[in-house]
Amino acid sequence: MGLNIKPLGRNRFFLDVRVRRPGGTDRIRETFEGTRQAAEERFVQLRKEIKDAQELTCRFETFGDLIRFYTGKKGGLVYKDERAFATLDHDLGDTPLPAFPARLEAYVAHMRRHPSPRTGKPYSNASINRAVARIRAAFNVAVNTELLDRNPITLARFPKLREVPRDAALNTENRRHLLTILEQHAPHLVPLSRFAFQVPCRKSELVNMRREDLDLINNAIRVRNGTTKNDQGIWKPIPPDMVGYFRSMPSETPFLFYRQEKGAYLPLGDFKRAWKTCLRLAGIGDYHFHDTRAQAATDLIDNGTPERVVMQIAGWRTDMLGR
């Protein structure tokens, strides 16, 4: 069988790899940069991977079928995950499942070389890791429900790329100024922000905290099993300057952090737009709400809290602060 390799310029080739199977043909197209010999070796590798992958036993024809099964099985996904899977379906959904691992390799390579068409910015290693993790999770659910015999998106073939933690922090003056702006333009976010600056939490943990999880005897809040990223429950301590807030909450609200609308107490939900608006008004640049988690943990350690205690509060199993 010949090698369908088309030169596109100096050390740049277009590979069109096709392997017949009963009922159709599996195909991978890829732009390759390197020598002619390296392009031929890549072509042979892709063809072998397609043939090997054709042995995968499953009940899905395409990756898009797998995505729809996974999202239906998981139920209501948060907006960020819904959007991410919609993007994956758009980019990779038509790929025959046996050929998917090779297609994913090309997709990851493309993400590492080209900027995001949505933002115009380069993809970070963290963004690529999250995309691969979502794909691996979809395959895992299919394997666990015995609709797929194995997960081909292995860590050996798709290793986690090294991530450089964000180095974003606000000094005391900037924090006070931001809280003042929040008080003026988004007062419903002030208690949550005050808590987040002192106790390392995920946004999802904060917005889902409910009255029945509040323990004012021990001044702590229970984040229940299954609601944290690692599915294990956590106790979050209440800072002394916030005890009064929790003791004086309206009895009608079931949420610890809430907003009022037409006399009803509602959860905060996704407040990204209000947060970004207040950052702009405060003259603060690249600072995500999630950055409060690392900042709170660092402040606790700097103030003498043992690191193992901080890790327990934050829900980290490994050292996330690089200490």
Image: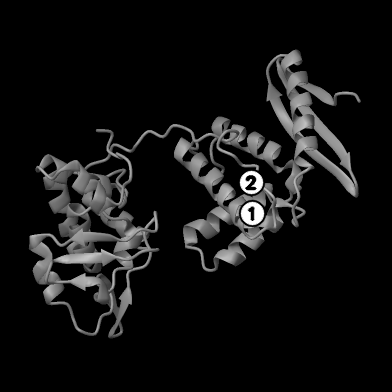
Q: Amino acid at mark 1?
A: Val
The answer to whether residue 5 is left or right of residue 105 is right
Q: Position of residue 46 (x, y in %)?
A: 75, 30
Compared with 251, 8 (above or below) is above
Q: Are marks 1 and 2 in contact (CB under 8 Å)?
A: yes
In this figure, which residue is indicated by the disc labeled 2? Answer: 151
* Viewer-closest of 119 and 154: 154
Q: Residue at x 40, y 63 (%)?
A: 226
Position of the C terminus, as image quadrant, is: top left
Instruction: Please give left or right for residue 195 compared with residue 151 in the image.
Output: left
Q: Position of residue 29 (x, y in %)?
A: 76, 35
Task: Give the structural element (helix, strand or loop) at label 2.
Answer: loop
Question: What residue is at 54 percent from the left and 53 percent from the top?
Answer: 84
Q: Is residue 55 above or below residue 225?
A: above
Which amino acid does the dot numbered 2 rest on? Answer: Asn
Locate the N terminus by quadrant.
Answer: top right
In the image, 265 versus 219, the foreground residue is 219
> Could you tell me residue 211's position as x and y percent?
25, 76
Asked whether, in this view, residue 107 is left or right of residue 211, the answer is right
Mark number for residue 143? 1
Q: CA distance from mark 1 to mark 2?
A: 7 Å
* Residue name at image x 39 percent, y 58 percent: 231
Name the N-terminal-most of marks 1 and 2: 1
Would residue 14 be found to the left or right of residue 290 on screen?
Answer: right
Q: Residues within 10 Å of mark 1 (few under 14, many from 20)?
A: some
Q: Is residue 110 visible?
A: yes
Helix, strand or loop at label 1? It is: helix
- Specify the quadrant of the image occupied by residue 201: bottom left
Task: Report the front residue among 241 and 112.
Answer: 241
Whether residue 124 is visible to the viewer of this picture, yes or no, is no
